Amino acid sequence: MEKKWALCPLALSTTVCVFLVVTSFNMGLPSSLPSIFSNFRAWNSTTSRYAFVESNLSDHPPPPPAGPKIPRLAYLVSGSKGDLDRLWRTLQALYHPWNLYVVHLDLESPAAERLELASRVANDTLFRKVGNVHVIIKANMVTYRGPTMVANTLHACAILLKKSKDWDWFINLSASDYPLVTQDDILHTFSSLPRNLNFVEHTSRLEWKAGQRAKPLMIDPGLYMSQKRDIFWATQRRELPTAFKLFTEQRLNSITHSLEFVVVIQTGSAWMALSREFVEYCVWGWDNLPRTLLMYYTNFVSSPEGYFHTVICNTPEFAHTVVNHDLHHISWDVPPKQHPHILSLADVPKMIGSNAPFARKFGGNDPVLDKIDADLLGRKNGSFVPGGWCVGSPPCSAIGDRTWLKPGAGADRLAKLMERIVRSEIFALKQCK
């Protein structure tokens, strides 16, 4: 009898709790239960859907909310021995307080040059105030013919992702590159583009590269030595892979006719503009393909000309985002040699006619750079390229609104390029072919 009486308070409190729940829903209990269970089922479905990375990939969840209207670019500008002043000039010509920058002088450059670069960045008033220029202090060994250039690029990508995920495209350049349009021109034009586009010049037609680059096995001493040495070859050869399809840079002949000359220009390089989403995939490699291909290309001659090309074209999530263009004007000798033709004043009309935002390869302090500064960039006295953000006296000594853009003639040229390579049938016809 005492136990029965002891249960009364429990029953009473339970009744009160049920009454409060029903009252809070402002409706009858029978009609509340379906809503409760419906909410639970929706929560349970969402939880199970994203329980594993594989589900996240296969179900294609909705994209995150759109970011700012003005995209943000993340640059890597790299150089080697003797490139300090050239790299510094390229960085100033590229600078915009809205963007991010990583600069790197490789291990072949003297320690004094690397320290001077770090000192210049640290002591620059604007760089110090904005904090968007980062120097790779622990230099990497970089050899173009081996995989170390790919490793250095991935290193820069990882640094940029660590510093901020609030950027849209990664662009790799060297000290031998130079812009042909202002950053306001690029940001204005890229504002109207889908943020998932990747600009990678590529082809699956290996031709002579199948026998001379894909099948031979080479070792790059840059992986384990502190000084540059040429690659050496293993006696064994390998067959072309069957688990994935190889892609490489594409060098297409474009012939320009005039009354006086015929010029053959070949384009294609290891330089590209990659979406942040694809960069994250290459760094994290959640389905292991980027790591597998990184190991494969370790023994591949000139792997920078094929690694990112092969990764993106063998990944269905990204293959449809590839634009078959590297955003560069590059002039090759005929027949092409290992390195492109050094651009000069005579090449300025062709550079402008290409509508490309960048060009290479330039010599140090060549008069053609002064011509580009004066006629295309409006850059004076070795200062920054003026844009909507520039305020103060002298100009660009202070920062105004970083998102206020003042596009010029370069934006018109770049828009024409996008009409041809993105907004035409060429876009789909040249993807991963």
Image (spheres, rainbow, N blue to C red):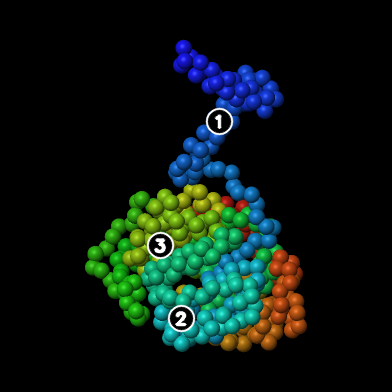
Q: CA distance from mark 1 to mark 3?
A: 58 Å
Residue 33 appears anywhere in the view: no
| Mark 3 residue crowding within 10 angstroms, few (<14) / some (14–19) / many (20+) | few
Residue at position x 61%, y 23% in the image: 16
Q: CA distance from mark 3 to mark 2?
A: 31 Å
User: Extreme front residue here?
Assistant: 2
Nearer-N-terminus badge (2/1): 1
Q: Amino acid at mark 3?
A: Glu
Residue at position x 37%, y 63% in the image: 297
Secondary structure beneath label 2:
loop
Number of labelled discs?
Answer: 3
Secondary structure beneath label 3:
loop
Q: CA distance from mark 2 to mark 1?
A: 59 Å
Residue topped by disc 1:
40
Viewer-proximal residue among 308 and 385 = 385
Is 278 on the left or on the right of 31, as rendered? left
In the displayed structure, 28 sits above or below 42; it is above
* Nearest-to-viewer mark from 1 and 3: 1
How far across and down, in percent of the image, does residue 400 sit?
74, 72
Q: Which mark is residue 207?
A: 3
Residue topped by disc 2:
80
Nearer-N-terminus badge (3/2): 2
Nearer-N-terminus badge (1/3): 1
Q: Which mark is residue 189?
A: none
Q: Amino acid at mark 2?
A: Ser
Residue at position x 43%, y 76% in the image: 139
